[in-house]
Amino acid sequence: MAEQDPTESDFQEVDTPAVEPELNPPETFAHALMEIAAEQHVSDLFISDQPDATVIRMRRMGRLREVRRLPLPYGRRLLNHFRALAGIDIADLSRPADGRARFRLEDRRELDVRFAVLPTVTGQDMAMRLFDHSRGLIGLDDIGFLEEERAMVERLLSAPSGLILVAGPAGCGKTNSLYAFLNHLNNGQRKIHTLEEPIEYLLPGINQSQVNVRGGLDFADLLYGCMRQSPDVIMVGEIRDRRTAETAIRAGTGGQLVLATVHAQTAPTAVQNMLAFQVNRHFLADALVGVLNQRLVRQLCTACRRLGAMPQGAQEDQTYYDAVGCDACKEEGYERMTCIPEILEINKPLTQAIVRGVSADELSDIAAQEGLLSMARGAMARITSGVVTPEDAAYVISDPQVRAIATYAMDARRQDDADSAEVA
Ligand SMILES: [Zn+2]
């Protein structure tokens, strides 16, 4: 690798780098960029033209960081190189476009990349989503469930038929969780189909079909077709229209186990959002087995995490941990991403509430009485046992208790920093 190519140390940089002088051919640079992105488990790369430079940023463990600033003409050549690789028209810069490419890395690893480009006032913005196949298939153990949560998820997945919804905002790991569920169900005795857009990982022993909206093939069409293939389990990438919602519910009441994502911020609103598609509430209540809603957060490195100072009058079980940084975690203080889930298991009182047509708030109240595993509870359990920092939990969850301990932790660290500055 030539000197000017990106190196490991470039990606550790925190300060905004200056625009760089002449560099290697874009092909060499692009390949080096992919090697490092795969090595560091980067989830997204962004190349954006700004008025004075083409900026490369990456998202790793949920955090966005600027890593390079390239001269605009060089940036244009790099973007053209990626466009060509992804099969995107180089001549027409006036329209959004998308494509894919596969990179063969050293040690024979393969990296699949999904590209999307958008014209901007300063040039182009290219987003690349990275899928590293060497990371292997995800199981229920890899998601980060606590014992009680895992038991409830397994109970939901043991239902012979019905509808299981996975909710949460974009980038909260819904697809990962669905793949883990499929992996758990894929014991050779079930016929499993997935309807995806796009297919992110190939799953051995599972029939995967890709939605092609531009080609006139949507989730509902595929789902109709799929039901004739006598499946036991169907995974629907996303329910986003009435036809798909109705068909998924029909499959769920008709003997199949349907797993689907739906756009919602909480488990009870996932139910309401299904009803907003104007599906029959009796059928939905009948089909629904449970809802998983989740957020992704950074998991503390167990080798270096440090017990945080305790607030005055705090109870003994209100411990929390701070991130430190060591060799094992490349001085970052975090190991990987983990989840904080909210899990709703539908029982008789909840079924009756859905049939009655209660509001999302009422449904939340009933769910709380009926054993909902709330996100706040999940967050506090992870804070006190040192899985996540209070700040990271507060970053993704709005809950007074979590916010209070996060505020305390931030104040304590500020005090700590001030004290050590005084000593120095
Ligand atoms: Zn560490």
Image (cartoon, rainbow, N blue to C red):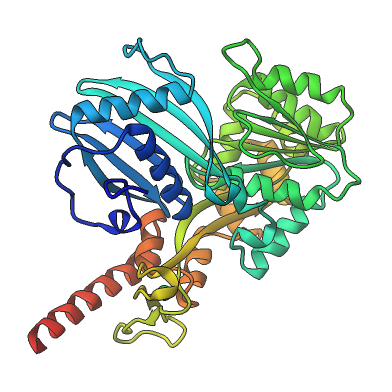
Spot occupied by residue 186 in the image (x, y as percentages of width and height): 81, 47
Spot occupied by residue 226 in the image (x, y as percentages of width and height): 80, 24
Q: Residue at x 52, y 30 (%)?
A: 101
Residue 190 appears anywhere in the view: yes
In the rendered image, the quadrant that contains the C terminus is: bottom left
Quadrant in the picture for residue 276: top right
Q: Residue at x 42, y 56 (%)?
A: 397
Question: Where ligand 1 lies, by image quadrant?
Answer: bottom left
Q: Is residue 66 left or right of residue 276?
A: left
Q: Is residue 270 left or right of residue 182?
A: left
Extreme-front residue of the structure:
2
Q: Residue at x 32, y 54 (%)?
A: 11
Spot occupied by residue 163 in the image (x, y as percentages of width and height): 74, 39
Residue 358 appears anywhere in the view: no
Residue 268 or 209: which is nearer the viewer?
A: 209
Image height check: is 336 above or below 245? below
Q: Is residue 176 left or right of residue 43?
A: right
Quadrant in the picture for residue 388: bottom left
Image height check: is 213 above or below 347? above
Spot occupied by residue 19 in the image (x, y as percentages of width and height): 15, 41
Q: Residue at x 67, y 19 (%)?
A: 243
Task: Give the mark count.
Answer: 0
Residue 103 or 373: which is nearer the viewer?
A: 103
